[in-house]
Amino acid sequence: MAELPVPEPGPGQVRVRVAASVVHPVDLMIRAGRFPAPLPAGLPYVPGWDVAGRVDAVGPAIGDLRLDDDVIGFSPWVRTTVGAHAEYVVLEAAWLTAAPTGIPATEAATLPTNGLAAAQALDLLALPAGSSVLVTGAAGQVGGFTLALARIRGIRATGIAGADDREFVESQGATFVPRSDDPIPLAPGSFDAVVDPAVIGPSLLELVRDGGGYVAASPPLRPEPVRDIRTFALDVLPDGNRLGDLVKLVESGDIPLRVAGVYTFADAAAAHERLAQRGVRGAVVLVP
């Protein structure tokens, strides 16, 4: 940990006193030097994509947000070097939305990054109700939100996950397929689309019908199109309005929030170690 100056908001920005943030698998890659894209030059910089907290200072022209509003949001910190693993973070007001009512900050913080990733993946595919989608890593955070949103949209989902995750996958209205090192026991062309947060890779294109869709976990992993299959890659963007829609689904009970563990900033190394273990179900949350 390090002491840095308390940031001040500019036009269109607010400062949030952070109550909770989340550690993601990509944070482990960045720490280990395995991130497949350029990183900001110069140290120190603060990581942290998700924020749940309270507005404690505002700049001009911030829209509907006010002092003391409880908010959640997504910070694209790799682009901005403004991360949420801090006591205070200054973000664009448009990247934030009101926190879900009655939900602890440690749970609310699990929504922004992974919820937006799932929503934007399905938005890219633009599947009509009645379509079929295969979701890898279906018991993980992005995969779990994708199952929930597919169910809400009337899309028939099939989820690949570990044997112990059948109950969760089926609780989201999806068909369960056990993860295996052997070829996936599914017929070629079985699905209208695939969402692949588990990075199984281009071999999944065989399972997509001609003219279907495929969403990779990040831009470097996007395969070349075959058989008129549209291929996309997740590049999660901050979007306060879209996040507000997800908050309503949390408040109605349609989207589950899952926490695997809560750690203080002083125990951030232990949080990274916990996330590095296989089979973590739910988010690893950091609190100041």
Image (cartoon, grey):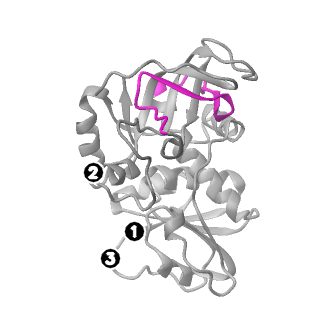
Name the residue: 50% across, 41% down: 77
Q: Position of residue 182 (x, y in %)?
A: 34, 81
Amino acid, disc 3: Asp
Choose between 221 and 186: the one closer to the eye: 221
In this rendering, the answer to whether 114 lies above or below 158 is above
The reply, left or right, for residue 270 in relation to residue 28 is left
What residue appears at the point 44 percent right and 40 percent down from the top-left corner? Answer: 258
Mark 3 element type: loop
Please name the residue that numbered disc 1 is placed on: 178
Q: Which residue is mark 2?
A: 276
Q: Secondary structure at mark 1?
A: strand
Please provide the residue range marked out in magenta.
81-105
Q: Is residue 99 magenta?
A: yes
Q: Which residue is the site of mark 3?
A: 181
Quadrant of the rendering where the N terminus is positioned = top left
Please identify the quarter of the rendering in which residue 22 is found: top left
Which amino acid lies under the numbered mark 2 shown in the image of this protein? Ala
Q: Nearer the viewer, mark 2 or mark 1?
A: 2
Residue 225 at what x, y percent from top left? 62, 81
